[in-house]
């Protein structure tokens, strides 16, 4: 039954990890990169490689993989687990902000201006200057199909520096002719509007300034002393732009700024002008309204601007989450690799004699020597402990994650521990994962005294130790009767036990103080909330009846060499006597 429950839990955890990785890939890779790009390919590869390394890091040791392979996969695999935790939390926190930014409505385009009432345009002053010597006369109508010729003039092209056509009816417009009134221009045949869309109104032709819209105030008068004739309709885009004298054909004069020379089929006269905004036919009506600004159009449609905003928001949110997760993990890693800090706690004991007042016990737990934390970490711990000058050193389990063959050299600095009343060791659950008996024998060789369900009477109090509960699987679990059953209860008793959950057995056997580890203080926030579900005390000092329990956060780290919200420590417990 236990195997079935374990398998179900393992499958549930695996499925959850798959879903989390897919969600992170969507948010951090798909939403932030272009399809088929190098960044998307790299992110997709990492989305498969990193969880595979994490699984390898978790299973390589127990699978009996070579130690070099364990070290190769442990650093990236375990570090990814820490990053995964805080990256997921950061993305969950950022998800509402992301949704809010994407829900923002785009800016509405401005109301389109009502089209002005079209008015006939006056002949260009430059055009009339070119034909002052000629007798005015009506310009012959161009044949049908003139719109095709007009289409060859692109918008904004210069035609011999001709002056712009100024719409008629605008105040201040230049006179059509000086001293002679122009003859009325006859209407051009219908059907010439098909080419009007080619040259929009107001385009520059011949270096001319854009045509002034009809009806605008302050424009020059249409004529000086003579009434303008009616403007022709239907001359298409060329006429709308103010091309003078388009008849059977128009000859552009080379050279900007030159006076245009216009040949007519039957004579010479002023060219008819078409109003710039006069709709003639279906095509002219399409060309008449001014186009909306490009920016407003893009905002209104929401096409390119919406997509770019979505990608921009995804990159900003994802980048902030990655930075937060990386910074958190980086700081937590630094805290572990620099070594544990010393924490001092005073614990008064009712039965402690006056002579034992101020007795110092250096509590070291959960060192977790393994593929990541090695000999250098052990040396830092030994140096830190020796600087406190303790009276006794207690290593309360989970010293290693591996066998003596691989980790014996990493544990070697433990020979340097110094304390007046010696150094003691009890097993933790990880010793039984690695082979407890080999480590019990090895720490004895290093100068430590293992307490296997045993008691050591000291001059001023009793020191006892029990095996970890994990040893029950091997028939070597905790035995409180063997360790405490026949002792003198008038003496104070200090118990070393790896897991805090045995506190109730300690209370029943009259223990005054239990020193434990195992919880790591949660190690990675919010892991402390999970640790509270399985342990009576996660970290610190608490009282249970007449027994006090102190739980150390540990001097190392299991799995990722990272601690967040639970800094590593070596605790110096100073015993105090009520008689002092």
Image: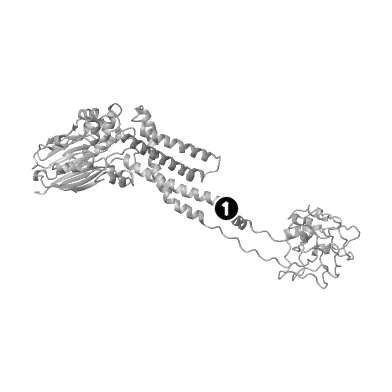
| Relative side of 73 to 385, left or right | right
Q: Which residue is situated farthest in the front direction here? A: 1
- Image point (53%, 39%), residue name: 38
Percent x, y of residue 530 = 31, 45
Q: How many marks?
A: 1
Q: Which residue is situated farthest in the bottom direction here? A: 225
Q: Quadrant of residue 136?
A: bottom right
For mark 1, give the secondary structure: helix
Q: Which residue is situated farthest in the right direction here? A: 266
Q: Nearer the viewer, residue 58 or 198?
A: 58
Residue highlighted by disc 1: 305
Q: Is residue 423 above or below residue 212?
A: above
- Image point (55%, 57%), residue name: 106
Quadrant showing the N terminus: top left
- For label 1, the crowd category at 10 Å Cα-Cα, with few meaning under 14, some 14 to 19 and many 20 or more, is some
Percent x, y of residue 364 = 23, 39
Percent x, y of residue 548 = 17, 46
- Image point (74%, 55%), residue name: 155
Does residue 202 appear in the picture of this structure?
A: no
| Relative side of 492 to 301, left or right | left
Q: Quadrant of residue 444?
A: top left
Does residue 517 appear in the picture of this structure?
A: yes
Percent x, y of residue 79 = 38, 39
| Relative side of 448 to 226, left or right | left
Q: How is the image coloured?
A: one colour
Q: Is residue 231 above or below residue 89?
A: below
Q: Nearer the viewer, residue 409 or 560?
A: 560
- Image point (42%, 34%), residue name: 52
Q: Nearer the viewer, residue 159 or 525?
A: 525
Q: Nearer the viewer, residue 87 or 227?
A: 87
């Amino acid at each position: 039954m236990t195997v079935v429950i374990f398998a179900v839990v393992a499958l549930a955890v695996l499925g959850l990890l798959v879903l989390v990785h897919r969600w992170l890939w969507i948010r951090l890779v798909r939403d932030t990169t272009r399809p088929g790009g190098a960044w998307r390919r790299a992110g997709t590869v990492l989305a498969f490689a990193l969880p595979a390394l994490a699984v390898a890091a978790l299973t390589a040791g127990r699978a009996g993989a070579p130690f070099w392979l364990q070290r190769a996969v442990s650093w990236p695999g375990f570090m990814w687990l820490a990053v995964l935790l805080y990256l997921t939390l950061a993305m969950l926190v950022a998800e509402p902000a992301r949704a809010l930014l994407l829900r923002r409505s785009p800016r509405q385009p401005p109301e389109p201006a009502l089209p002005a009432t079209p008015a006939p345009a006056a002949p260009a002053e430059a055009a009339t200057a070119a034909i002052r010597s000629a007798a005015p006369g009506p310009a012959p109508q161009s044949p049908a199909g003139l719109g095709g010729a007009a289409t060859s003039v692109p918008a904004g092209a210069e035609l011999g520096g001709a002056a712009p056509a100024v719409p008629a009816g605008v105040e201040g417009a230049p006179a059509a002719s000086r001293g002679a009134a122009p003859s009325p221009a006859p209407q051009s045949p219908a059907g010439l509007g098909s080419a009007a869309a080619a040259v929009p109104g107001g385009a520059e032709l011949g270096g001319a300034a854009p045509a002034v819209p009809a009806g605008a105030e302050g424009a020059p008068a249409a004529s000086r002393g003579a009434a303008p004739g009616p403007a022709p309709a239907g001359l298409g885009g060329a006429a709308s732009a103010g091309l003078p004298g388009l008849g059977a054909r128009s000859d552009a004069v080379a050279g900007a700024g030159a006076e245009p020379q216009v040949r007519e089929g039957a004579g010479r006269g002023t060219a008819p002008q078409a109003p710039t905004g006069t709709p003639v036919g279906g095509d002219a009506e399409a060309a008449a309204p001014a186009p909306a600004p490009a920016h407003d159009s893009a905002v209104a449609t929401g096409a390119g601007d919406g997509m770019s905003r979505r990608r921009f928001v995804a990159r900003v949110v994802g980048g902030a989450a990655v930075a937060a997760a990386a910074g958190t993990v980086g700081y937590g890693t630094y805290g572990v690799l620099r070594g544990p800090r010393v924490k001092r706690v005073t614990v008064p004991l009712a039965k402690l004699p006056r002579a034992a007042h101020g007795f110092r016990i250096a509590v070291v737990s959960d060192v977790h020597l393994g593929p990541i934390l090695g000999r250098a970490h052990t040396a830092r711990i030994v140096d830190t402990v020796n600087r406190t000058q303790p009276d006794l050193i207690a290593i309360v389990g989970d010293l290693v994650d591996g066998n003596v063959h691989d980790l014996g050299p990493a544990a070697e600095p433990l020979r340097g521990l110094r304390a007046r009343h010696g150094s003691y060791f009890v097993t933790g659950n990880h010793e039984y994962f690695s082979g407890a008996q080999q480590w019990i024998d090895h720490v004895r060789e290093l100068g430590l005294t293992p307490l296997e369900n045993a008691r050591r009477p000291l001059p001023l109090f009793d020191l006892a130790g029990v095996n970890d509960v994990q040893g029950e699987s091997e028939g070597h679990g905790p035995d409180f009767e063997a360790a405490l059953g026949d002792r003198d209860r008038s003496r104070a008793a200090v118990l070393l036990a790896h897991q805090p959950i045995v506190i109730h057995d300690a209370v029943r056997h009259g223990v005054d103080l239990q020193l434990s580890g195992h919880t790591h203080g949660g190690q990675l926030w919010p892991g402390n909330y999970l640790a509270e579900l399985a342990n009576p005390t996660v970290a610190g000092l608490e009282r249970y009846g007449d027994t006090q329990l102190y739980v150390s956060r540990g001097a190392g780290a299991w799995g990722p060499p990272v601690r967040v919200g639970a800094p590593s420590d070596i605790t110096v417990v100073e015993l105090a006597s009520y008689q002092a």
